[in-house]
Image (cartoon, grey):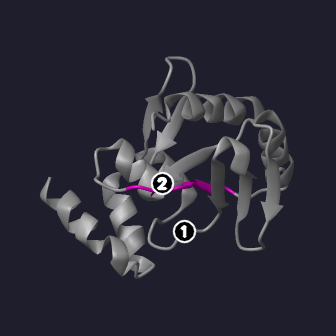
């Protein structure tokens, strides 16, 4: 599946809501060439008093619904195959400011950009969460 259109739509929604976010997890690793798959897209965000209203605006723009699971938020639309997870504190990734500073800005249509975490930071986080199912990928990434 080519996700460029969806990623472009997400980038536009983030820009309109003025949400600063960094893509993390397998989706971010796959964008950088890792041989991984995923059904969702994970983002690290800085939590503030406008977080919920920004996420609600994004959900509305994507014709999706916002769910608050307590430790994270999810924007989902099964019909459109949208599953976006938003986490404020990600083990192993340091501060949001540091993660944002080290991320790469990637455009999927030339207009809107998404911040993508470095593979090094993704690997550190996966190890911190003890996600053994992806360790073979981490080893592959370190070698390439």
Image point 44% across, 32% down: which residue? 106
- Residue 38 located within the stretch drawn in magenta: yes
The label on residue 90 is 1
Above or below for 139 versus 106: below
Q: Quadrant of residue 6?
A: top right
> Which range is magenta?
37-46
The label on residue 73 is none
Give the image location of residue 49, x and y in percent.
84, 55
Give the side of residue 34 with respect to residue 60, left or right.
left
Give the side of residue 126 with respect to residue 96, left or right.
left
- Residue 30 located within the stretch drawn in magenta: no
Above or below for 16 versus 82: above
Give the image location of residue 57, x and y in percent.
83, 40
Q: Which residue is mark 2?
A: 99
The CA distance from mark 1 to mark 2 is: 10 Å
Image point 53% across, 55% down: which residue? 39
Instruction: Tell me whether circle 1 and circle 2 mark residues in contact (CB < 8 Å).
Output: yes
Q: Secondary structure at mark 1?
A: loop
Image point 43% across, 45% down: which residue? 103
Comparing labels 1 and 2, the label whose residue is closer to the camera = 1
The residue closer to the viewer here, 36 or 117, is 36
- Residue found at the very far front of the displayed protein: 79
Counting residues from the N terminus, which is met first, the one under dot 1 or under dot 2? 1
Q: Secondary structure at mark 2?
A: helix
Q: Quadrant of residue 69?
A: bottom right
Q: Quadrant of residue 68?
A: bottom right
Image point 45% across, 79% down: which residue? 129
- How many numbered marks does the figure carry? 2
Give the image location of residue 93, x and y in percent.
46, 65
């Amino acid at each position: 599946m080519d996700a460029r259109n969806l990623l472009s739509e997400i980038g536009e929604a983030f820009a309109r809501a003025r949400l600063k976010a960094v893509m993390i997890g397998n989706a971010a690793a796959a964008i950088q060439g890792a041989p991984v798959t995923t059904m969702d897209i994970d983002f690290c965000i800085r939590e503030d008093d406008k977080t919920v209203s920004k996420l609600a605006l994004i959900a509305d723009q994507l014709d999706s619904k916002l769910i608050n699971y307590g430790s994270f938020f999810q924007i989902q639309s099964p019909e459109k195959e949208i599953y976006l997870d938003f986490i404020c504190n990600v083990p192993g990734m340091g501060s949001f400011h540091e993660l944002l500073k080290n991320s790469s800005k990637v455009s999927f249509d030339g207009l809107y950009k998404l911040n993508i975490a470095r593979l090094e930071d993704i690997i550190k986080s996966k190890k911190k969460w003890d996600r053994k199912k992806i360790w073979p990928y981490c080893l592959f990434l370190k070698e390439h």
